[in-house]
Amino acid sequence: MSRRWLLLALLLPAATAQAQPAVSHYDIIIRGGTIQDGTGRPGFHGDVAITGDRIAKVGNLGNAAADTIIDAHGQFVSPGFISVHSHAKRNAVARAENMLRQGVTTEIIDADGGFANSGGEDIVAQLADYAQHGLALNLGAYVPFNTIWQKVVGEDERRPTAAEIATMQELIRRNLAAGAWGISAGLDYKPAYFATREEVTKIVAPAAPWRTLFTNHDRVTPPAFSSIAGMGETIAIGNAAGIVPILTHIKLWPNEMGQSGRAIAAIRASTARGQYAAADIYPYIQANTFLGALIIPSWAQAGGREALLKRLADPALRAKIAAETTTAIVARAGGPDGIFLPTHAKQLTGYMAEIGATDATETVLRLVEREDPFGIFRFGSEEDLAAFLQYPDTAISCDCGSTTETKVHPRNYGAFPRAFGRYVRERHALSWEDAVRKATALPAAMLGMVDRGTLAPGMFADVTIFDPATIIDKATFVDPAQYAVGISYVLVNGRLVIRNGALTGATPGKRLFRAADMAIYRVGDGATRSLSVPSFTVRLTTAEGAPPTEYRGTIDLHQRTADRLATGTLTLSSPGRTFTLGGSGPLMAASGWTAFTGWMRDAQGSATPVTLTLDTANPTITGKGRRLTIRLGERSAVAKLR
Ligand SMILES: [Zn+2]
């Protein structure tokens, strides 16, 4: 460049310099990987820059500099995986090694209605308790229906009073207002099993204004033991209550093997009626729960464990329990051959041979009496599993969680890598980009989470880097506590928690709470979206310790299907400072609601993440009208709309 041209370049208006800063410096740059950004579009070669706890830029970063450079050549760079069905243990979340080494960066706890939950019914207290020693990953919670039912109604099979129903409704309202990511239930588990469909609907109905979800472990009842009927019930409750039904860890028990088409048709039909329904699935055909929980008849479990033990001590009742348990073992596991005992690392039949037992049901009852152990039930076929996995609105889940236990279902150590290694690389059930979407942007959308799940500017920097040629689970039923392989780096909120395949010990995880201006939205539905507000004013605090300043703003953002990310303009200006759009994430949309995540830049080149939601129909807010919420960095404000 000649001297004259250089001089001219220096004299160019600031606006040009602002749009194309000469030198960029980031905290972290992930270089040269194949970016699977979570939107479902094909992977592309590029870099990812991180500033603080957010994604700053995705694409070709040229010679930009960073404090830390991660070489991702030959690897996939994906958003961190979001586990929507978590049974994380409170003593394990500060390390979370079994989850981080699966690439999981966020867990939503209290799945199955709070199954085996010791945390109580207040999610704020529960999450505070979990976070006591720090969090290695992000943690959110559902309102646990079963925990609430058990607390209010107890262990007996009886009808709740009107006052008790009101109490349960209030507990649900309170937890949603406090930031729960929906309501979870496990209607297959006693005592919530005793709640009638009408009672459940009535109790969860106050959730409708939160535009949230009902994720339920389907109730499967004798004599038919029909999973499809159970799924129908979950959908019916969600539809009647006005919240999104999620068929969690979707599965068919042996008696309905091969009928995944019928189950999928029911989900599709609900969505087609305008009542969106979705599912999640773990990549195994073996389920895990307390050995007796789902095979001992419900009447025998009424009143809790002590009552069950008492009934088992009565010879006449024991014979009746045994007869019904035998039927259930066939329905749920195809017979005694389908049961594995993780604490003994043996098949039930192998254990029987060892102790010289001949009656499988009697052996099960004795184990329940003595140890109340876990049992792993082989249920279905991989054909059904693949069909469920391929349904566009089925997320990949694990039904596991942070744990230090070693005698558990192998999914606790291998579920997500198994989904990728076995069902994408080996069996081609899904494309890589779709599998990544199902572990990231789809679960985020199912939850109504607007700032995670996609590798795009403004999103939190939860990132998983893995080798598509090697990612696989190593955990087996006999030896489950084996870490998965193929995952080299994991970042949570912009900090490395796995470096070169090893745990760093950092605890950058956050407690995640859902805000009332978030809604469940859909991804990959082919819709074009836009967010346009010609003019608004908002009082924003943009510097530490400074008083709020009035900013004038304008928004004109669009997203065509093929783009997957928004384009357009967004400006915020006060007499002293102007922010313009520095990078766009996706536009997210539901009925009467649109959200956007991106970066704002000012003339000095400083960058601030921004999240917008435009709500025109938020039922939790009294008074009608459109409401634009702006989160700029850590601060949020509601804009006045004309
Ligand atoms: Zn479950």
Image (cartoon, grey):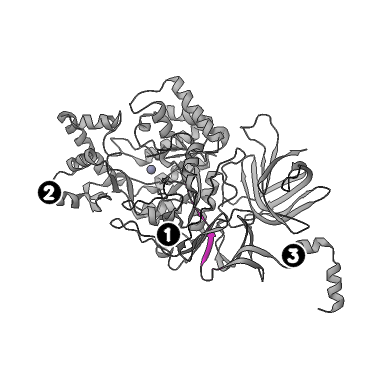
Q: CA distance from mark 1 to mark 3?
A: 39 Å
Labelled pair 1, 3 in contact (Cβ < 8 Å): no
- The magenta-colored residue range is 70-85
Based on the picture, tell me whether residue 110 belongs to the magenta stretch.
no
Q: Which mark is residue 21?
A: 3
What is the tally of numbered marks visible in this picture? 3
User: Quick check: 160 above or below 433?
Assistant: above
Residue on which disc 2 sits: 356
- Classify 10 Å Cα crowding around label 2: few (below 14), some (14-19), many (20 and above): few
| Left or right: where 76 falls relative to 347 | right
Mark 3 residue type: Pro
Q: Is residue 44 visible?
A: yes
Q: Is residue 629 visible?
A: no
Q: Which image quadrant for residue 110?
A: top left
Q: Which mark is residue 417?
A: 1
- Residue 28: x and y in percent read 60, 63
